[in-house]
């Protein structure tokens, strides 16, 4: 029987104890911890814990423990509860007293002592992980609103329940209309500022009154720059706030710091960042369209083939701003259906392993339990429980994803684009969110064809090349991550 409390206690003990944890969050499958001292993490023992599918970034400050869908939410809640108990009374410096005038706990970044190990293995990886940390908490709302939007689209196209569809549209669209505010809030929280100030500055991006402002000779429009503008605005606000707090005495800090932060960052957003972010967003949209129209099959092959390694490294969430930008611009993201093919290749590869290793009951049990999640686009259980420990099947799964991506990309070259109207799970769960430049019906058919291609190619490639000729993987190798 599963014991989430015991799992949480073991995770805390093996990651250096409560005093070593400065931040906790989770996504669909991973418990994400920020640790002060990566050397205190016992990676081997953590991987060996029952229920742990994998560990990412054990030598960095950004630690991810893969637990799988459903389980991760319960374990995270237990970790947070136990941390709160351990930190009661101000034991932990990183969760210390509320700063005067800020109304928020001291940011985790301040808890890292001088001379501690570098948070990540490189500046690019560190930046991507921090951007991912901004967007990961938004994923549940993106999924929920996306599914509602997809169902509403089906009802509208079918002409059913006309009295209900406007309400569903309002529910699905409300979050996306104000997503800039949430991005600003999360950005300030992640980078050590006051979250509400980050949200206040980012709100300028979506405020209707910006239509009266002219920058660089061009009249601004509400939402210009989208989440990229909100991200930049909140980053700037955080820098300004930190500068002010280091220079103003306490009596003036309470009044002047928030005023100067919102005023200076707000003006910079209106007269610079929105225009620049809008240009970047336009370039992203134009680049995606060019990529698929000109090199669709090749682009799909690369994106579908390389996405599993991104998932393995935990960097795939950093693509959310690009998806969101495309949805804001075009009404759908053309990248998500291509990337979804990676998960389909993984499913095909796992099925081949299931067929090939008929006598390995432990591994076959792991595959049976992980396949439903894999079919719905949650690939980590199969990655860490099956293909990655075996080695070759991970590569052949990528081959399957590349074939599926090439299939979808080929049709984009013919003028039939497939897109997702919201960010959510992939696999079969993406069907309600699909549309395209020719409507939802062709998009559904092409996407289904891509899935079948990825399944079949991943299965065939794994069956043919997934294992050394004439050998069978040792049981310890096959089940090490299950």
Image (cartoon, helix red, strand yellow):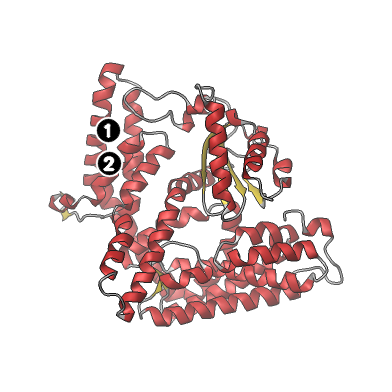
In the image, residue 179 sits, relative to residue 342, either above or below, namely above
Q: Residue at x 47, y 50 (%)?
A: 136
C-alpha span from label 1 to label 2: 8 Å
Q: Quadrant of the C terminus?
A: bottom right
Extreme-left residue of the structure: 212
**Label 1: how many residues lie within 10 Å, few (<14), some (14-19) or many (20+)?**
many
Residue at screen point 80% across, 71% down? 358
> x and y percent of residue 290 in the render?
39, 71
Q: Is residue 455 left or right of residue 96?
A: right
Q: Which residue is mark 1?
A: 261
Mark linked to residue 201: 2
Label count reads 2
Decide: is 270 above or below 16: below
Report helix, strand or loop for mark 2: helix
Instruction: Looking at the picture, tell me which residue is in the foreground, 166 or 360.
Output: 166
- Determine the secondary structure under disc 1: helix
**Residue drawn at the location 62% of the way across and 45% of the way down:** 4
From where the camera sits, is residue 250 visible? Answer: yes
Farthest right residue?
470
Q: Quadrant of residue 3?
A: top right
- Checking the image for residue 462, the label placed there is none
Q: Residue at x 23, y 30 (%)?
A: 259
Residue 228 appears left or right of 40:
left
45 in relation to 104, above or below: below
Q: Position of residue 301 (x, y in %)?
A: 55, 71
Q: Mark 1 or mark 2: name the one nearer the start of the chain.
A: 2
User: Contact, CB < 8 Å: mark 1 with mark 2?
Assistant: yes
Residue 451 screen position, x and y as percent: 55, 76
Q: Which quarter of the picture shows residue 342?
A: bottom right
The quarter holding residue 57 reads top right
Disc 2 crowd rating (10 Å Cα; few below 14, some 14-19, many 20+) is many
């Amino acid at each position: 029987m599963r014991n989430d409390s015991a799992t949480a206690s073991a995770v805390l003990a093996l990651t250096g104890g409560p005093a070593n944890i400065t931040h906790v969050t989770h996504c669909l499958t991973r418990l994400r911890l920020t640790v002060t001292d990566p050397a205190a993490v016992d990676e081997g023992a953590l991987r060996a814990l029952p229920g742990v599918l994998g560990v990412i970034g054990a030598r960095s400050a950004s630690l991810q423990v893969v637990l799988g869908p459903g389980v991760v939410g319960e374990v995270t809640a237990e970790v947070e509860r136990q941390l709160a108990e351990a930190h009661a009374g101000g034991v932990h410096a990183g969760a210390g007293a509320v700063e005067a005038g800020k109304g928020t706990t001291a940011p985790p970044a301040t808890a890292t002592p001088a001379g501690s190990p570098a948070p990540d293995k490189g500046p690019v990886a560190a930046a991507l992980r921090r951007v991912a940390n901004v967007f990961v908490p938004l994923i549940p709302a993106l999924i929920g609103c996306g599914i509602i939007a997809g169902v509403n689209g089906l009802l509208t196209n079918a002409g059913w329940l006309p009295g209900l569809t406007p309400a569903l549209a309002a529910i699905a669209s409300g979050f996306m209309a104000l997503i800039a505010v949430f991005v600003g809030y999360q950005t300030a929280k992640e980078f050590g500022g006051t979250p509400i100030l980050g949200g206040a500055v980012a709100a300028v991006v979506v405020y209707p009154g910006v239509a009266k402002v002219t920058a660089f000779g061009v009249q601004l429009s509400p939402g210009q720059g989208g989440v990229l503008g909100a991200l930049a605005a909140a980053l700037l606000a955080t820098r300004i706030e930190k500068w002010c707090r280091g220079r103003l005495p306490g009596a003036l800090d309470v009044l002047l710091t928030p005023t100067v932060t919102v005023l200076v960052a707000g003006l910079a957003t209106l007269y610079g960042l929105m225009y620049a972010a809008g240009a970047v967003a336009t370039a992203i949209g134009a680049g995606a369209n060019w990529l698929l129209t000109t090199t669709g099959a090749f682009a799909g092959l690369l994106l579908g083939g390389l996405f599993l390694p991104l998932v393995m490294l935990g960097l795939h969430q950093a693509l959310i701003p690009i998806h969101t930008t495309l949805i804001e611009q075009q009404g759908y993201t053309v990248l998500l259906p291509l990337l979804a093919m990676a998960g389909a290749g993984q499913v095909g590869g796992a099925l081949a392993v299931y067929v090939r290793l008929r006598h390995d009951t432990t591994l076959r049990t792991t595959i049976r339990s992980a396949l439903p999640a894999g079919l719905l686009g949650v690939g980590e259980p199969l990655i860490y429980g099956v293909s990655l420990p075996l080695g070759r099947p991970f590569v052949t799964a990528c081959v399957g994803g590349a074939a599926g991506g090439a299939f979808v990309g080929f049709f984009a070259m013919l003028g039939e684009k497939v897109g997702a109207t919201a960010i959510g799970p992939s696999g079969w769960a993406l069907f309600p969110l699909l549309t395209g430049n020719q409507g939802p019906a062709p998009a559904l058919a092409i996407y289904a064809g891509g899935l079948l291609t990825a399944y079949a190619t991943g299965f065939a490639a794994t069956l043919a090349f997934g294992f050394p000729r004439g050998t069978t993987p040792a049981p310890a190798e096959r089940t090490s991550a299950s």
